[in-house]
Amino acid sequence: MNKMVSTTASAQARDQAQARPHRYGIQNGLIYWGIVVLMASLLLWLGVELAKRIEWFLPYSGGLGLSLVAGGYLLELRKSRKARASKARQQEQPGPGSVIMILPVLVCLSAPAQPPVVPPQAIEQFQQVVGNRAEAAIILGGDYGAAGGIYSFRGGKVAELSVAKLGGGGDICSPQPLGLDGIEWAPVLQGNLGHFTADNDFPSGYLQGNRLVYDVLAVQGGAGARFYLNDHFSLAPTISGIYGHTENNFKAQNAVGGTVKAAASGTFVDWTINSWSVQPALDLDYDWHWGRTTFGFSSRYNYFHTESFNSTSPVANVNGDSHTWENKLDADVPLGWKILGGELHTGGFFERTELFGGIADGLNADHFYTLNGRLVLDFLGKLWKVKWLGLGASCFLGDHFSGWSAGLDLRFKF
């Protein structure tokens, strides 16, 4: 009886399936593939339009990529040379096995050698400077927006600091309509290759008279978009990543330093750290004109989260958060004199930068001021994509440090 009921039910289900029209299944398949084709076409169109607008930039991005590869290769070459030199020094030193073979009686009668102990006072001073100093160094060297130059510190633990950079950021094409209440937008790229060195002096305490040297190589890359809300006001959210390679070297200047170096080398000092940072940022710009003079106010907030990896020391690491808030007033004044086909301009900016978190602790400051002056030639419309080219100089002033920088002032406009 049960078998008969089952057979009857199966027959009814088969009849219903045969009677059910297949039209809906075919339509669903057509809709699915239609969506796939539509999305693929849309993405291809966006890619083609973007390629048209940034075609001029591709050789430069390729050159940047090659320079980054070359920089990474040189870094790895330097690391391999240091590793080989360290291995050679270890091979030259007699191992414990050879001591036992030559002086077996002496080894048996002597107490086992104890590893040198790092004095607690030295550990306390190292812990005050390692994490925050390394984090500040990575940010100053890696972020293209941070001011490069030579800094001198007063009353702090850092004596001299030098930052050299090659990089920048901005719109990579002319603004395009967004299709929303007259708002326009342009893609933004930013990148930087920076080198940072710092001599950390110990003016007091157990390590007084000794030095701790930092050497940082940092690479930054990021992207975003700038939205032009009207002829004067724009905003640009961006996100960037920073890779940092930090080397630490303790310079013993006295007997105490020599003892500490022998005990702390490879742990608290004389280490290498690789790190990564993520940096979301928001930039607000407002420009206005007074006659032929252009004034601009900008406010930029940056957040940095930094973590270390591949540390050669079991105790040295970086894991922290930093914030910077830059507020800048800029002026561009045409002088009416023409040289080499371009009009001479002067100008500069005044900026206050607020510091929070690890970078504030590392620099022993919660803010600093920057004053810049420049003398440039306006080549807009005469030299491809170049707005101006000339010389600029800046000075920095904080509660515990001062500094300066000078160099080429080059700005593009698309």
Image (tube, rainbow, N blue to C red):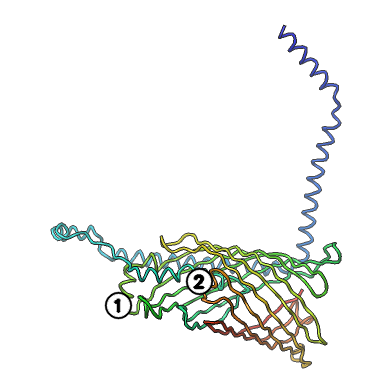
- At x 51%, y 73%, the residue is 362
Name above or below for residue 11 compared with residue 144. Answer: above
Question: In the image, residue 382 lies at what x, y percent?
Answer: 78, 82
**Mark before the other along the chain sequence, 2 or 1:** 2
Query: Residue lying farthest bottom?
Result: 337
Q: Amino acid at mark 1?
A: Ala
Mark 1 surroundings: few (<14), some (14-19) or many (≥20) residues within 10 A: few
Mark 2 surroundings: few (<14), some (14-19) or many (≥20) residues within 10 A: many
Q: Amino acid at mark 2?
A: Val
Quarter of the image with the C terminus in it: bottom right
- At x 19%, y 58%, the residue is 100
- At x 68%, y 65%, the residue is 238
Q: Quadrant of residue 324?
A: bottom right
Question: In the image, residue 257 lies at what x, y percent?
Answer: 33, 75
Q: Which residue is mark 1?
A: 255
Which numbered dot is residue 216?
Answer: 2
CA–CA distance between discs 2 and 1? 28 Å
Left-right relation of 79 to 301: left
Question: In the image, residue 162 lies at what x, y percent?
Answer: 52, 79
Give the number of the mark in front: 2 or 1. Answer: 1
Name above or below for residue 42 compared with residue 391. Answer: above
Q: Quadrant of residue 340?
A: bottom right
Question: In the image, residue 48 lies at what x, y percent?
Answer: 78, 59
Which numbered dot is residue 153?
Answer: none
Left-right relation of 386 to 221: right
